[in-house]
């Protein structure tokens, strides 16, 4: 049905998508996870209240979250060029993907950590735990299942963003769908890329949920 | 044995900032606990007892006043010094507060690892503690796989890990059924006797205090209204708050006198364990030749003695009342007149 050339293109696109999505998720978590922790810790009822930092951080995150990704993608072009040297291809797309998803991840991390029972944190405080010890040894390990569910949602959202980047030459399956499916009306190519995206989403979502359920010791 | 003070609270006041001005949780609390005793703090919900226990290890910082534990003024400490001082004070909670993603053994190792003890040494100590609380076979179970009583045992072992001098128990048995409550209280008693750890018990249940405490403070509306030996308070509660806690349901019984007339006086007769086998009331009725109406009766065992109280309604005839009072005086039975509907 498809030429060998076309099949190679699908393979390459899929690999590029994986590369973009996984690298972006990793980098976005490197930023979003500490920010999410900081949001919880610095809250006025948190274990180390810092109201001003909390307020400022909250506003910045909300601002970034309110910009639609496609607009952010275009608006960040100068930043992308400064960092990567180009605005085309999958590596360049990682920049807006990270900046666009880190605030969203920070909020997800915040809500996961807030699920940890206040009493358990109080117990750790009664044992003389420091703020850092509470974060690293109580909050993150106790919230791990919920954090993993969040990661599955984050990764599928980033996958969606990466496909959007196809419109501005972002590389991966998104670009194939736009170039062949949209501009050349090759509906069959469009459907295959769509199917690939559906499969990848299912894969990550299912994997995330399974691991989260397996490591959760609360119900057994 | 000489009584050595281990906890001293002086002039403690705690106010929480609220929308319409500050809310006073505790006011003018003075308290002294001796080393090696089991001290109860009892009060109805909202009396401030949970705040008071949190002021002892500074989980709540007092607005005013001083808290001294083991000779160290905690209310002066901050940061690292305070965290180190807290390791000498164990604490257990109503909801156990175990780490849900760690096994029983890992939960007990947790405070040791926080204190910088090596993994192997921590595990060895945790196994000893599991032995003490009788849960060795559950070492690899997660909290979700344990019953309430077992969870509290793990929490107790965890609280003992850093060899504290003081153990704070915040409503530690309130989420447990009566049988489990008794076994946890027995364990606390054992720990107190064998390890010499001073135990502070916060509760709203008199039976907990009766069962293990030697002294008790009654907290009512942010103040300590009575404090003393458990037997003494039980025999002669001076305040309405103490009577409410000692005899829950007293208000309902107050409705009973409806079938007498208002002019008939009521007496509260207290049995202090001195005359356990004598049928005091029956003898009194026979000796005085006058019937009394028993409105309320309640006896219980405290430290091996039978203690209780009974509320009787006296006959209307004044001479019969005098005879009854004279009889009670000769029998050395403590009694007091009960005013309107308050037992």
Image (spheres, rainbow, N blue to C red):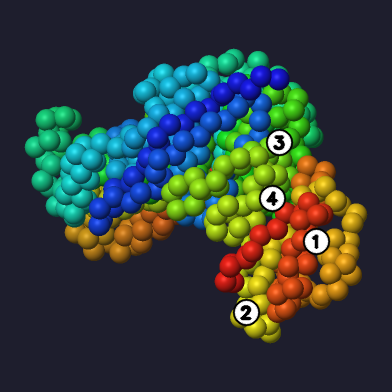
Residue where numbered disc 3 is placed: B188
**Pointers 4 and 2 in contact (CB under 8 A)?**
no
- Whether residue A55 appears in this view of the structure is yes
CA distance separating discs 1 and 2? 21 Å
Location of the C terminus of chain B by quadrant is bottom right
Please identify, in this view, whether the residue under mark 3 or under mark 2 is nearer the observer.
2
Q: Label 1 marks which chain's residue?
A: B
Question: Which one is in front, A109 or B13?
Answer: B13
Please identify, in this view, whether the residue under mark 1 or under mark 3 is nearer the observer.
1
Residue where numbered disc 4 is placed: B235
Q: Secondary structure at mark 1?
A: helix
Q: Are marks 4 and 2 on the same chain?
A: yes
Q: Secondary structure at mark 4?
A: helix
Q: Is residue B329 above or below residue B27?
A: below
Please identify, in this view, whether the residue under mark 1 or under mark 2 is nearer the observer.
1
Percent x, y of residue B302: 76, 46
Question: Which one is in front, B150 or A25?
Answer: B150
Q: Label 4 marks which chain's residue?
A: B
CA distance separating discs 1 and 3? 43 Å
Location of the N terminus of chain B by quadrant is top right
Upstream in sequence: badge 4 or badge 1: 4
Upstream in sequence: badge 4 or badge 2: 4
Upstream in sequence: badge 3 or badge 4: 3
Please identify, in this view, whether the residue under mark 3 or under mark 4 is nearer the observer.
4
Q: Label 2 marks which chain's residue?
A: B
Q: Which numbered tag is attached to residue B263?
A: 2
């Amino acid at each position: 049905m498809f030429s060998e050339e076309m099949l190679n293109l699908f393979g390459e696109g899929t690999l590029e998508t994986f590369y973009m999505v996984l690298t972006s998720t990793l980098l976005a978590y490197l930023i979003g996870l500490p920010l999410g922790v900081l949001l919880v810790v610095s809250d006025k009822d948190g274990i180390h209240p810092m109201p001003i930092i909390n307020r400022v951080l909250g506003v910045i995150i909300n601002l970034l979250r309110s910009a639609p990704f496609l607009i952010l993608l275009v608006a960040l072009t100068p930043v992308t060029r400064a960092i990567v040297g180009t605005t085309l291809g999958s590596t360049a797309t990682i920049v807006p993907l990270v900046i666009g998803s880190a605030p969203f991840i920070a909020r997800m991390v915040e809500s996961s950590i807030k699920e940890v029972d206040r009493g358990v944190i109080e117990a750790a405080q009664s044992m003389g735990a420091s703020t850092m010890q509470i974060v690293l040894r109580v909050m993150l390990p106790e919230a791990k299942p919920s954090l993993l569910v969040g990661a599955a949602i984050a990764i599928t959202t980033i996958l969606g963003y990466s496909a959007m980047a196809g419109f501005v030459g972002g590389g991966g399956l998104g670009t194939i769908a736009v170039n062949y499916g949209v501009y050349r009306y090759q509906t069959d190519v469009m459907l295959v890329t769509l199917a690939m995206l559906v499969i990848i989403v299912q894969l990550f979502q299912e994997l995330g949920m399974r691991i989260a359920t397996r490591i959760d010791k609360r119900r057994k | 044995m000489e009584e050595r003070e281990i906890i001293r609270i002086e002039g403690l006041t705690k106010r929480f900032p609220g929308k319409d001005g500050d809310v006073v949780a505790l006011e003018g609390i003075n308290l002294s606990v001796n080393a090696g005793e089991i001290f109860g703090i009892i009060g109805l919900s909202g009396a401030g007892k949970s705040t008071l226990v949190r002021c002892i290890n500074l989980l709540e910082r007092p607005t005013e006043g001083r808290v001294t534990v083991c000779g160290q003024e905690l209310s002066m400490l901050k940061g690292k010094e305070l965290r180190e001082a807290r390791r000498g004070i164990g604490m257990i909670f109503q909801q156990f507060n175990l780490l849900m993603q760690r096994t029983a053994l890992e939960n007990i190792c947790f405070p040791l690892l926080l204190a910088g003890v090596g993994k192997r040494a921590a595990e060895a100590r945790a196994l000893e503690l599991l032995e003490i609380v009788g849960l060795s076979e559950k070492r690899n179970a997660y909290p979700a796989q344990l019953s309430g009583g077992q969870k509290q045992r793990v929490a107790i072992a965890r609280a003992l890990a850093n060899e504290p001098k003081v153990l704070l128990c915040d409503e530690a048995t309130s989420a447990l059924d009566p049988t489990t409550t008794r076994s946890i209280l027995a364990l606390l008693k054992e720990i107190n006797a064998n390890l010499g750890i001073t135990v502070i018990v916060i509760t709203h249940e008199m039976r907990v205090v009766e069962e293990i405490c030697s002294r008790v403070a009654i907290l009512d509306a942010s103040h300590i209204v009575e404090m003393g030996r458990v037997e003494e308070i039980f025999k002669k509660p001076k305040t309405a708050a103490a009577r409410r806690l000692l005899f829950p349901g007293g208000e309902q019984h107050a409705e009973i006198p409806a079938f007498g007339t208002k002019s008939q006086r009521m007496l509260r007769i207290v049995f202090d364990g001195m005359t356990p086998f004598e049928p005091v009331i029956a003898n009194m009725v026979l000796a005085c030749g006058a019937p009394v109406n028993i409105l309320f009766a309640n006896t219980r065992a405290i430290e091996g003695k039978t203690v209780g109280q009974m509320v009787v309604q006296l006959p209307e005839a004044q001479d019969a009342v005098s005879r009854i009072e004279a009889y009670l005086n000769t029998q050395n039975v403590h009694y007091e007149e009960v005013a309107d509907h308050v037992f």
